[in-house]
Amino acid sequence: MIPVIPRPTLGFIGAGRVARALAAAAAQAGYAVTAIASRRLDAAQRVASALPGCAALPIDRPEDMNAVFSHADLVFLSVPDDAIATCAAHLAPRTGQALVHCSGASEVGLLAPATQHGAQIGGFHPLFLFAGLDDDATRMSGSAITIEADAPLSDTLHGLARAIGCHALSIPAGARMRYHAGANYAASFLLCLLDEATWLWQAIGMPEDDARDAMWPLVMGTLNAARERGLAGALAGPVSRGDASIVTRHTEALASLGDHHATLYSLLTLRAVRLARQRPHADNAALDAIAHAIAPYLPPAPPEGNP
Ligand SMILES: NC(=O)c1ccc[n+]([C@@H]2O[C@H](COP(=O)([O-])OP(=O)(O)OC[C@H]3O[C@@H](n4cnc5c(N)ncnc54)[C@H](OP(=O)(O)O)[C@@H]3O)[C@@H](O)[C@H]2O)c1
């Protein structure tokens, strides 16, 4: 039986945005972060220099990654998703040690080659956008972390999540793609929507700085309202009012710009209609008229899943 290690020593392979924040948060919570390895030694040194007693290790050959297991019980493979399987094939942790990746999309099974000497494997995916900011480690507090591991590693990872001020979530096996696609909407795709907004404003001659400055109160106000009232409750704009003629004129204006602007708008309007139908006293006839107005701009309907 592999023992539960309540406070394992921690190591990282890959010294990027996640490693930097997670290592700092764990160290602040009293965990010993003992080694960070990276192909660019200066990157590992930069992370390690902020952590007392942490060794920065070079990766000149793939086998060098195993040096981290001489320092740490629990090792995070915090490399890009495309490198996880290749790296895992070179790793040989021992019984009592654990190898964990931080990806939301990649299966935990990619780490399976590393289990041949009895080590445990798992997934530890923070639902937080690490942009490489200096205070990512403190800003991530309060986030959810999705954990996939068998006992006793799952207990160890839950303990770490709690210690760094986060809370643990679990997802069923085989659900990672839908789970991670959802996370994309709540993070990077928000940025894409804001890019579309500022692009449209700049296209009518608004200076970039003015466009960005104008955006923040609107964005933050919307998110705060959504937090207080829920998504349907916070909905504003023409769909919430049932203004089909405005939606029609929006789509016409956007269609003249080409490049799928009207398609993007119409797909999102379809979602807004679905939210609006959840509001008390929804005017379903007006919402039907809006759905009708955007129909010409929508791609062919998928077999199922329409609002
Ligand atoms: N960023 C986020 O918001 C976020 C959020 C949650 C989860 N994640 C997940 O966390 C993991 C790491 O993401 P990240 O954003 O921290 O990536 P990142 O900032 O790009 O850092 C990845 C690190 O891996 C190293 N690396 C790249 N290829 C390698 C290879 N073939 N072998 C060994 N090391 C390699 C790179 O350093 P060297 O080139 O020096 O080796 C780099 O420092 C990914 O699985 C990602 O899906 C990211």
Image (tube, rainbow, N blue to C red):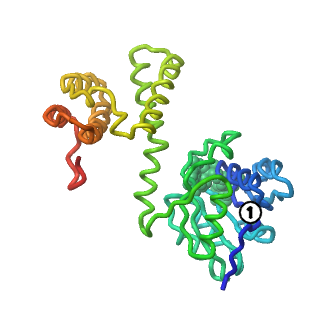
Q: Is residue 244 above or below residue 228?
A: above
**Amino acid type, mark 1:** Gly
Classify residue 272 as left or right of residue 48.
left
Name the secondary structure under disc 1.
strand
Quadrant of the drawing holding the N terminus: bottom right
Residue at the far bottom in the pictured view: 1
* Residue appearing at x 55%, y 53% in the figure: 144
Residue position marked by numbered label 1 in the rendering: 11
Residue at the far right in the pictured view: 53
Which quadrant of the structure image shows residue 74? Answer: bottom right
Compare residues 67 and 101 and report the one nearer the observer: 101
How far across and how far down the image is residue 181, in percent? 42, 52
How far across and how far down the image is residue 234, in percent? 37, 34
* Residue appearing at x 37%, y 40% in the figure: 231
Disc 1 crowd rating (10 Å Cα; few below 14, some 14-19, many 20+) is many
Residue 296 shows in the view: no
* Residue appearing at x 58%, y 71% in the figure: 111
Classify residue 91 as left or right of residue 191.
right
How far across and how far down the image is residue 288, in percent? 15, 36
How far across and how far down the image is residue 142, in percent? 59, 48
Q: Is residue 91 above or below residue 306?
A: below
Q: Is residue 123 above or below residue 143?
A: below
Classify residue 140 as left or right of residue 270.
right
Classify residue 177 as left or right of residue 98.
left
